[in-house]
Amino acid sequence: MGEVREKATLAKATTSRLAALTTEAKNTALFAIADALLARAGEIVEANEEDLRRGRENGMSPSLLDRLALTPQRIEAMAQGVREVAALPDPVGDTLASFDRPNGLRVRQVRVPLGLIGIIYEARPNVTVDAAALCLKTGNATLLRGGSSALSSNGRIVEVIRDAIRSADLPADAVQLVADPSRASVDEMLKLNGLLDCVIPRGGASLIQTVVQNATVPVIETGAGICHTFVDASADPAMALAIALNAKVQRPSVCNSMETLLVDRSFAEAHLAAFAEAFRERGVELRGDDGARSLVPSMNAATDADFATEYNDYILNVRVVDGLDEALAHIARFGTQHSECIVTADEDQARRFLQEVDAAAVYHNASTRFTDGFEFGFGAEIGISTQKLHARGPMGLPALTSTKYIVVGDGQVRE
């Protein structure tokens, strides 16, 4: 038996016990994980340095190195995220519906764990902690397959997590990490029918499409983030600039950062030059359409391929549009149904935008950077789903549950 199937089998064997755990037992393990992350932060940073060194040697971009890097502050934030998960209500066992049938049957629909969840992700080792914590809180086992760039970090983090789970008298095998960095390990995970109850990909468009197109186990699809901010003619200039800058430069390497700024023509004629200068001061390369370049000639030319690219970097597309309809059409063509924003003082324009844009999160006068489980009050998140079945948007605890019907009778048989 190969590594992937062996570890999946070990994890699957824990699911019955996990499903029966009390909230108190799960929270005890979560607090143990949080404490262990802080106590062993030095070990984790040391392992992360190995990954960063390899990344630099292999020419990894600064934005990807940022995604990979762990500092004591980031580890503290990871531990806080685990504590946030522990503090959240446990959805397992919640009654969603309860009704009596005319024949006397009493029916309840309750939340239950999914079982064994596979997570395939790339260069962000904090996902290792988020996934383990959310799965444990919901009584799920997890099979983790991180990217090759974070092998040392993920290996040490999972060691810390498993030791903490064991110290809380729960089965350490509930959290497994696939160490094989080859494509073959992903291919094998995607076909573990009968072991994996679902798989969740977290990463760029290429990884997500590979999983969606090749998996025979159920997939919860998370999406690439080609996110837009549309600045309407009525927008307050200071507010619009603050929101746009935050959406692009606060952390450009993540999926909820802005990739394209859409600007109403009348607003652009008055303010685009100042916006462009503010972005340049923060090291952002601007790529504009003809309308944007006519106002700011120093912009590089943007192509359709640029508008369809998730940069995760200090690069921003700019397009000048003639009103809301043209902005909506652009978003419908190039958006990935992730996060979209309108900055406007016109309530009717805002209402149309919020109703008509098809995305997991839509914003009026706020940065797209808030599409995040922690920011939404969910604690850590397992990912941001851009599909429409089962879960959409930041996936917190309820998204990692299914339901079962509990039916109680007193001797009824069907005629």
Image (tube, rainbow, N blue to C red):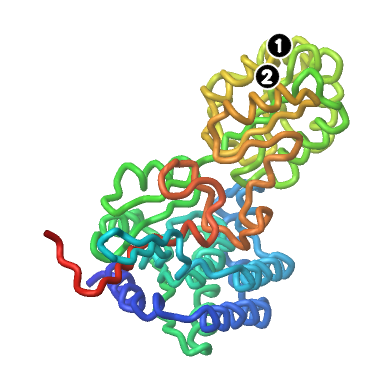
Q: Residue furthest left?
A: 415
For the N terminus, which image quadrant?
bottom left
* Foreground residue among 285 and 55: 285
**Which residue appears at 72% of the width and 70% of the height?**
72
* Foreground residue among 58 and 131: 131
Residue 186 shows in this picture: yes
Does residue 313 appear left or right of residue 1 in this picture?
A: right
Tell me the kind of residue under disc 1. Answer: Gly
**Which residue appears at 42% of the width and 64% of the height?**
111
* Foreground residue among 151 and 257: 257
Q: Quadrant of residue 282?
A: top right
Count of numbered circles in the view? 2
Q: Is residue 79 above or below residue 374?
A: below
**Percent position (x, y) of residue 94?**
48, 67
Identify the residue position indicated by label 2 in the image: 319
Q: CA distance from mark 2 to mark 1?
A: 7 Å
For the C terminus, which image quadrant?
bottom left
Residue contact at pointers 2 and 1, CB within 8 angstroms: yes
Q: Quadrant of residue 90?
A: bottom right
N-term-proximal mark, 2 vs 1 = 1
Q: Is residue 199 above or below residue 91?
A: above
* Foreground residue among 86 and 182: 86
**Which residue appears at 62% of the width and 47% of the height?**
254
Q: Is residue 86 above or below residue 62?
A: below
Identify the residue position indicated by label 1 in the image: 291
Circle 2 — which element? strand
Circle 1 — which element? helix
Tell me the kind of residue under disc 2. Answer: Arg
**Which residue appears at 52% of the width and 58% of the height?**
382
